[in-house]
Image (spheres, helix red, strand yellow):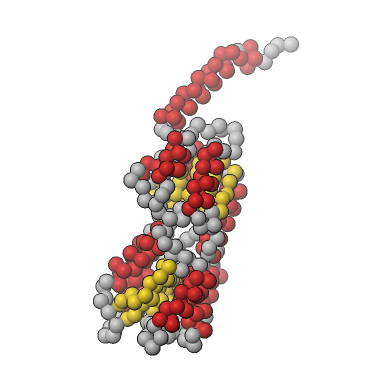
């Protein structure tokens, strides 16, 4: 019986494979990328902020489903809106030697040390939904998510257009997101930029409600008491959940949300469309949570040695009450 060809010339064959592998590993190392084995599942460690809103729940579901469909092993950590929990999760991912880390940071600052630890371990980091503020932008390979400043501008432009032609002061109350969070800072900035176009529009009260429905109701109740006897013309909420909580407070105060007080929010979740269809919310600026598929594609592209764009901005629209009933059945979240 003759030995198979690969066995006869096996020494030369395996030497060639060994040398090819060494060259491939050296090339990946030179690019600062991890040397993935082609014969095993990719492992993604994802640090999620929490479950503070319907948007966040949909975001988590999108990531879990996309990982399953892509055949990527997902290590998912819920930080319960605490930065210290996210830092612990990232260090756990580093210790577990995951292939890629994805982070949705609860706040913008305080990430430098742990991100440098990830880079030293050769693990690329992808930022999703929210950016961080670090002088060394080489600590992450890409950011994918929305333009929060532009979302704020869109909300402000809608109000400016709605109020054009009037002469009286327009008094606005604002429900901010989590203190120090990128969307809270940026959505406020964009809104303020837009309403400068009409000096009659003034924010008379502004306070954090932590992106949650319960806090939105609580803070709006306080606004209504503080402004008793004075007209509040509009409410601007940094997300739909806070707006929906505020709508409850407005109704309990004997007022009609969407009529007595215009309600403007951001995210575009189903609950907002239902409120618009009921005439209680006037407009929502879309912020898509469906980041799972592009995130998994980015992980695969990294494995293939591709260079990712520094920023991937999601495409989104603005939805008003007059289109809510038609659009509601199409909403995925």
Q: Position of residue 68 (x, y in %)?
A: 61, 48
**124 up-or-down from 144: above or below:** above
**317 up-or-down from 275: above or below:** above
Q: Residue at x 37, y 85 (%)?
A: 231
Q: Position of residue 322 (x, y in %)?
A: 45, 78
Asked if one can make out residue 295 in the rendered structure from this viewpoint, the answer is: no
Q: Position of residue 38 (x, y in %)?
A: 56, 33
Quarter of the figure with residue 286: bottom left
Q: Residue at x 46, y 53 (%)?
A: 105
Left or right? Give the position of 5 relative to 92.
right
Q: Residue at x 37, y 61 (%)?
A: 185
For this orientation, the residue located farthest to the right is 1
Quarter of the image that includes the N terminus = top right
Quarter of the image that includes the C terminus = bottom right
Instruction: Work out whether residue 120 or residue 33 is closer to the camera in this orientation and state it.
Output: 120
Q: Position of residue 221 (x, y in %)?
A: 47, 79
Instruction: Work out whether residue 226 or residue 155 is closer to the camera in this orientation and state it.
Output: 226
Asked if one can make out residue 114 in the rendered structure from this viewpoint, the answer is: yes
Count the marks: how many?
Answer: 0
Quarter of the figure with residue 98: top right
């Amino acid at each position: 019986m003759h030995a198979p060809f690969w066995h006869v010339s096996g020494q030369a064959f395996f030497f060639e494979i060994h040398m090819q592998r060494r060259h491939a590993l050296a090339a990946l190392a030179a690019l600062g990328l991890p040397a993935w084995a082609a014969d095993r599942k990719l492992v993604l460690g994802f640090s999620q902020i929490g479950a503070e809103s319907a948007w966040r729940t949909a975001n988590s579901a999108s990531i879990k489903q996309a990982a399953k469909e892509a055949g990527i092993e997902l290590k998912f950590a819920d930080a319960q809106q605490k930065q210290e929990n996210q830092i612990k999760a990232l260090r756990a991912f580093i210790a577990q030697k995951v292939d890629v880390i994805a982070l949705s940071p609860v706040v913008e600052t305080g990430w430098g040390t742990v991100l440098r630890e990830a880079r030293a371990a050769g693990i690329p980091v992808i930022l999703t939904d929210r950016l961080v503020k670090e002088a060394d932008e080489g600590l992450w390979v890409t950011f994918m998510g929305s333009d929060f400043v532009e979302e704020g501008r869109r909300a402000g432009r809608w109000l400016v257009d709605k109020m054009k032609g009037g002469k009286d002061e327009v008094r606005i109350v604002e429900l901010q997101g989590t203190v120090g969070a990128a969307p809270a800072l940026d959505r406020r900035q964009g809104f303020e930029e837009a309403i400068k176009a009409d000096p009659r529009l003034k924010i008379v009260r502004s306070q954090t409600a932590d992106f949650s429905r319960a806090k939105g109701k609580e803070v709006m109740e306080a606004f209504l008491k503080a402004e008793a006897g004075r007209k509040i013309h509009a409410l601007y909420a940094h997300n739909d959940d806070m707006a929906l909580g505020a709508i409850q407070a407005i109704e309990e105060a004997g007022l009609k949300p969407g009529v007595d007080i215009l309600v403007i929010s951001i995210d575009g979740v189903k609950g907002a469309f239902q409120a618009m269809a009921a005439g209680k919310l006037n407009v929502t600026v879309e912020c898509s949570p469906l980041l799972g598929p592009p995130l998994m594609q980015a992980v695969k592209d990294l494995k293939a040695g591709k260079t990712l764009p520094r920023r991937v901005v999601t495409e989104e629209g603005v939805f008003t009450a007059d289109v809510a009933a038609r659009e509601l059945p199409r909403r995925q979240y």
